[in-house]
Image (cartoon, rainbow, N blue to C red):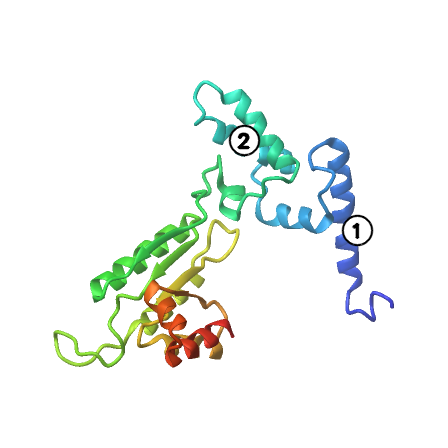
């Protein structure tokens, strides 16, 4: 099969060949490890390379030196240890760690989490916190299980909208945040599988999965219900697996 028949254009072939040549040259110079492939070099070049650092060699050296500063009195030993683990492919840092460690681009923490309380103030305090953390390179998550279900009465009168619309606000906000030009923001939203609105969350996920990073919180009470053959617990567990 020719490249044309496979849908690959001549420009794409030329770009790949150029990247392949770059990768081989950098490996000869010792700036990329022998196990690195062309697609890996393309991704690193587009997303992770920092200023005038010599390719992956420079990024790994900076990461190792930055981390070793915390091993007081043994900095040189740990810098070399960290570097060797990275360079040999034994340690593979997550995106924030690879992109931001030792730079001014953002934080190098992959995950952060928060609990969203059952009030408008908590909704939007949490949303602001998530947006600012995401802007600075964090991976983010939040648990929405404390929010009263849809239809429950609220203090000022009327009925609650439930946790799902709040979760949608978080998903939408995260998708609009740029993390130092490396990727779009993302948030994982968690909901107790025993929450009355759990099926509504699953319906949303099935209907529109893009950007919807849902997680289900399973407590001991649910596990016990499963063990006891509770039909509702079995139904939810089956749906969660699907």
Q: Measuring from the top left, give residue 69's x and y in whole percent.
A: 46, 26
Residue extending farthest to the right is 1
The percent position of residue 138, horizontal first and vertical second, equals 42, 49
* Disc nearer the start of the sequence (1/2): 1
Mark linked to residue 82: none
- Does residue 99 lie above or below 176 as drawn? above
Residue 176 versus residue 92: which sits nearer the camera?
92
Callout 2: 10 Å neighbours few (<14), some, many (20+)? many
Q: Residue furthest front?
A: 228
Front disc: 1 or 2: 2
In the rendered image, residue 102, in percent from the top left (x then y), is placed at 48, 34
The answer to whether residue 228 is visible is: yes
Look at 77% across and 34% down and name the residue there. 28
Q: Residue furthest top?
A: 73
At 49% from the left edge and 20% from the top edge, which residue is drawn?
74
Residue 33 falls in which quadrant of the image? top right
Q: Up-down: is 108 above or below 79?
A: below
Q: Nearer the viewer, residue 22 or 76?
A: 76
Residue 216 in the image: above or below residue 51: below
Residue farthest to the left, as pictured: 156
Quick check: 79 left or right of 116? right
Query: Would you name the residue on which mark 2 appears?
Result: 64
Determine which quarter of the picture holds residue 14: bottom right
């Amino acid at each position: 099969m020719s490249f044309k028949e496979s849908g690959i254009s001549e420009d794409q072939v030329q770009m790949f060949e150029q990247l392949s040549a770059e990768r081989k040259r950098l490996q000869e110079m010792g700036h990329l490890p022998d196990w690195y492939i062309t697609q890996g070099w393309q991704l690193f070049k587009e997303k992770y390379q920092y200023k005038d650092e010599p390719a992956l060699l420079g990024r790994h050296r900076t990461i190792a030196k930055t981390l070793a500063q915390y091993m007081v009195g043994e900095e040189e030993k740990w810098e070399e240890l960290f570097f060797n683990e990275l360079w040999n492919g034994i340690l593979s840092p997550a995106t924030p760690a690879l992109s931001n460690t030792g730079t001014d681009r953002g934080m190098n923490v992959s995950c952060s989490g928060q609990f969203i309380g059952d009030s408008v103030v908590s909704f939007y305090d949490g949303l602001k916190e998530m947006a600012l953390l995401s802007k600075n390179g964090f991976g983010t998550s939040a648990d929405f299980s404390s929010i009263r279900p849809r239809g429950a009465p609220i203090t000022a009168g009327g009925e609650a909208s439930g946790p799902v619309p709040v979760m949608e606000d978080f998903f939408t906000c995260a998708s609009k945040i740029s993390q130092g030009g490396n990727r779009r923001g993302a948030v994982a939203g968690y909901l107790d599988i025993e929450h009355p609105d759990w099926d509504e969350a699953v319906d949303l996920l099935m209907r529109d999965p893009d950007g919807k990073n849902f997680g289900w919180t399973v407590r001991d009470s649910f596990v016990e219900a499963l063990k006891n053959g509770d039909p509702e617990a079995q139904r939810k567990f089956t749906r969660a697996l699907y």
